[in-house]
Image: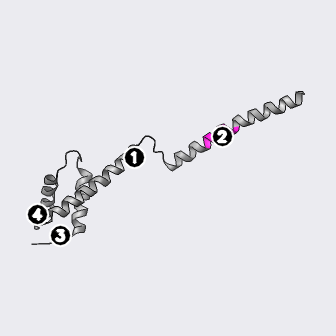
Amino acid sequence: MGSVSDGELIGALEEILTEADLEATTVRSVMQQLALRFPNDDLEGRKSFIRGELVRLMDTIEERKESKEEPGAASLGEQEEEVVEEEAAESSGSEVVIEEIEEEAEEE
């Protein structure tokens, strides 16, 4: 009977979750997949560890998805581009005002 390490279990959980539908994934289905991957190990005694890691990994995956899907979350490059465009618009507007003032001064 082999003894699978915590690292091996976590790696297997990550692989399983990247391929799984998180909405339909259960502890039981994950335990069954782990049993297939590690047939020589009795994983029932490590169920609480597996459950804890499963919850942690699922939360991490969900957070990543949410941060990618946020409509207001622009990348740093997009944010910099917006600032440059805003500054250009502001400066062109102020240049027009300066030109008008100069024209009025010349007329007087």
Looking at the picture, which amino acid does disc 1 mark?
Lys
Residue sitting at x 35%, y 47%: 65
Q: Is residue 10 above or below residue 104?
A: below
Residue 47 occupies quadrant = bottom left
As measured in the structure, the alpha-carbon distance from the residue carrying label 3 to the one carrying label 2 is 60 Å
Q: Earlier in the sequence, mark 1 or mark 3?
A: 3
Between residue 23 and residue 11, name the one nearer to us: 23
Query: Element under label 1?
Result: helix
Residue sitting at x 52%, y 45%: 78
Residue position marked by numbered label 1 in the rendering: 68
Residue position marked by numbered label 2 in the rendering: 88
Which segment is the magenta one?
84-91
Looking at the picture, which amino acid does disc 4 mark?
Glu
Instruction: Say if mark 2 contacts mark 4, CB within 8 Å.
Output: no
What mark, if any, has residue 57 been given in the picture?
A: none
Looking at the picture, which amino acid does disc 3 mark?
Val
As measured in the structure, the alpha-carbon distance from the residue carrying label 1 to the one carrying label 2 is 29 Å
Looking at the picture, which amino acid does disc 2 mark?
Ala
Instruction: Say if mark 1 contacts mark 2, CB within 8 Å.
Output: no
Horizontal relation, residue 101 to residue 76: left or right: right
Instruction: Say if mark 4 contacts mark 3, CB within 8 Å.
Output: no
Q: Earlier in the sequence, mark 1 or mark 4?
A: 4
